[in-house]
Amino acid sequence: DAGITQSPRHKVTETGTPVTLRCHQTENHRYMYWYRQDPGHGLRLIHYSYGVKDTDKGEVSDGYSVSRSKTEDFLLTLESATSSQTSVYFCAISGNSGASYNEQFFGPGTRLTVL
Amino acid sequence: AQKVTQAQTEISVVEKEDVTLDCVYETRDTTYYLFWYKQPPSGELVFLIRRNSFDEQNEISGRYSWNFQKSTSSFNFTITASQVVDSAVYFCALSLMEYGNKLVFGAGTILRVKS
């Protein structure tokens, strides 16, 4: 299995508080992604990174920011959490070339509840 | 824009029945990848198959088979002789062979296999 961990795995927070989710990989893969999973929508891309300090928006980026200061870590921040951001968040990675480029490996997910 | 449609929200079958999960995709690109992922009740995302747009050959892996038809933009997944352990949410996804390799997911199909 690809070495991807997410922390925390579960979090309950209150509306208006900042929240940061961490994705850590040990595969030295170039690309990292954050998705959210909601019933009826499957997974939707929030932000992704194509290298250290190189990030771009996905389909549902409003209310989220990301940072990648090291190859192995990709942080997702909710500056002021809202109840609509209650979801399961998945991090994924893919490599630079070949088979690892076209396949995304997913972390275990983080369940976030915003009250 | 890319889109993946899984019209079947939920399917229930009795063990040993065959079941087909439908996936229809939309893209204007000629080079792309199609995927199927399985999400068992434990929540992790399990990669099942990747197919590139140049390879329409059907694939069989044990009880699983996939039928890719570019003419109808479909990538259907069949489980033969279903088992209770096949109960899960199944996602079809599309990515373009472009910078970033972002995945677009369908909404998922819940498969319930009853004993």
Image (cartoon, rainbow, N blue to C red):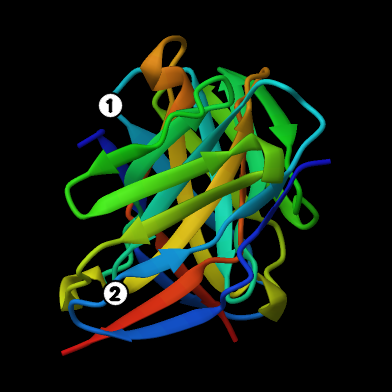
The answer to whether residue B93 shows anywhere in this view is: yes
- Amino acid type at mark 2: Pro
Number of numbered discs visible in the structure rendering:
2
Question: Which residue is label 1 attached to?
Answer: A26
Chain name for mark 2: B
Where is residue A19 shown, x and y percent of the image?
Answer: 57, 61
| Quadrant location, the N terminus of chain A | top left
Quarter of the image where one finds residue B43: bottom left
Chain name for mark 1: A
- Amino acid type at mark 1: Thr
Say if A27 sits above or below B49 in the image.
above
* Nearer the camera: disc 2 or disc 1: 2
Where is residue B63 shown, x and y percent of the image?
Answer: 20, 55
Task: Residue at 47% x, 31% y: name it.
Answer: B51
Q: How many C-alpha atoms fall within 10 Å of the one at disc 1: few (<14), some, or many (≥20)?
A: few
Where is residue B1 shown, x and y percent of the image?
Answer: 84, 41
Q: Nearer the viewer, residue A61 or A11?
A: A61
Q: How many C-alpha atoms fall within 10 Å of the one at disc 2: few (<14), some, or many (≥20)?
A: few
Task: Residue at 17% x, 73% y: name it.
Answer: B83
Give the SS element for disc 2: loop
Query: Do marks 2 and 1 share a chain?
Result: no
